[in-house]
Image (cartoon, rainbow, N blue to C red):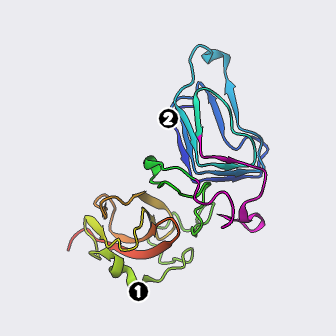
């Protein structure tokens, strides 16, 4: 396995390993995943590849109830390996971290996926409000339903402009947001990143309605935006 980027997944209740690095493992990155009720992290080296060394793999900000794999080619940092249940309500699929748990504020910055220093460990940040699994409306880009989100659209223009947006969306970042995610109405993630210049390039997205989520370390705001192909 090589060149994989795996992040913000919840993996649970399976007989095999939650995360497995098959050797030669090269340039694999696993960030901010929540993994429980699985077997330990494992690796397998086929005899056909026993002369090729594994290298340059990273495992950061993951929460798991088994031990982290120890290997000289695996850089493991800011993970919490503990059988203690630090999630709000596993039985009802609420995988957010408990506010008094060691998951809060102990993550490291990962520019590759836009995670800031002091983020929460695991797939969810404390104030996240997304749902694991597929969205039933994902294939319907013209859906008008936004039932997956609890959003007040009335103040979109207070934080974002211009609406509708043609190419560049500007953020009035008065609340010091660090991350953004953009979804279709059906819940498909189309763009994510860190907020460094208070603007987002949307020129590659087709015209339509999108949901944008802005996050800082302790707050999340959700807005509806309109993308147009011309003014």
Residue 102 position (above or below residue 28) = below
Does residue 99 belong to the magenta stretch? Answer: yes
Residue 15 position (above or below residue 103) = above
Q: Is residue 114 left or right of residue 134?
A: left
**Residue at 43% across, 76% down:** 223
Q: Is residue 18 left or right of residue 150?
A: right
Q: Is residue 8 left or right of residue 229?
A: right
Secondary element at image label 2:
loop
Q: Which residue is under mark 1?
A: 154
* Number of dots carrying numbers: 2
**Residue at 40% across, 73% down:** 175
Pick whichever, 77 or 44, lies toward us: 77
Q: Quadrant of the C terminus?
A: bottom left
Cα–Cα gap, marks 1 and 2: 42 Å
Does residue 153 belong to the magenta stretch? Answer: no
Image quadrant assignment for residue 179: bottom left
Q: Quadrant of the N terminus?
A: top right
Span highlighted in magenta in the image: 77-106
Image quadrant assignment for residue 229: bottom left
Residue 55: horizontal and vertical position, in percent? 54, 26
Residue 114: horizontal and vertical position, in percent? 44, 54
**Residue at 41% across, 76% down:** 224
């Amino acid at each position: 396995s090589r060149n994989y980027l795996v992040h913000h997944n919840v993996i649970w209740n399976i007989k095999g390993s939650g995360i497995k690095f098959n050797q030669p493992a090269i340039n694999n990155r696993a960030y901010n995943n929540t993994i429980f009720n699985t077997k330990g992290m494992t690796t397998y080296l086929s005899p056909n590849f026993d002369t090729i060394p594994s290298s340059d793999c990273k495992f950061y900000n993951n929460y798991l109830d088994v031990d982290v794999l120890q290997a000289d080619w695996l850089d493991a940092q800011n993970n919490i390996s503990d059988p203690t249940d630090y999630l709000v309500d596993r039985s009802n699929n609420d995988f957010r971290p408990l506010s008094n748990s060691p998951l809060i504020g102990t993550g490291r910055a990962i520019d590759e996926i836009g995670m800031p220093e002091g983020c929460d460990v695991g797939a969810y940040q404390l104030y996240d409000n997304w749902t694991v699994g597929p969205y039933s409306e994902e294939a319907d880009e013209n859906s008008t339903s936004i039932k997956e989100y609890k959003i007040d659209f009335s103040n979109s223009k207070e934080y974002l402009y211009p609406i509708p947006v043609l190419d560049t969306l500007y953020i009035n970042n008065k609340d010091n947001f660090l991350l953004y995610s953009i979804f279709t109405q059906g819940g498909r993630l189309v763009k994510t990143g860190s907020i460094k210049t208070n603007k987002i390039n949307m020129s590659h997205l087709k015209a339509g309605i999108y949901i944008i989520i802005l996050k800082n370390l302790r707050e999340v705001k959700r807005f509806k935006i309109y993308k147009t192909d011309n003014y």
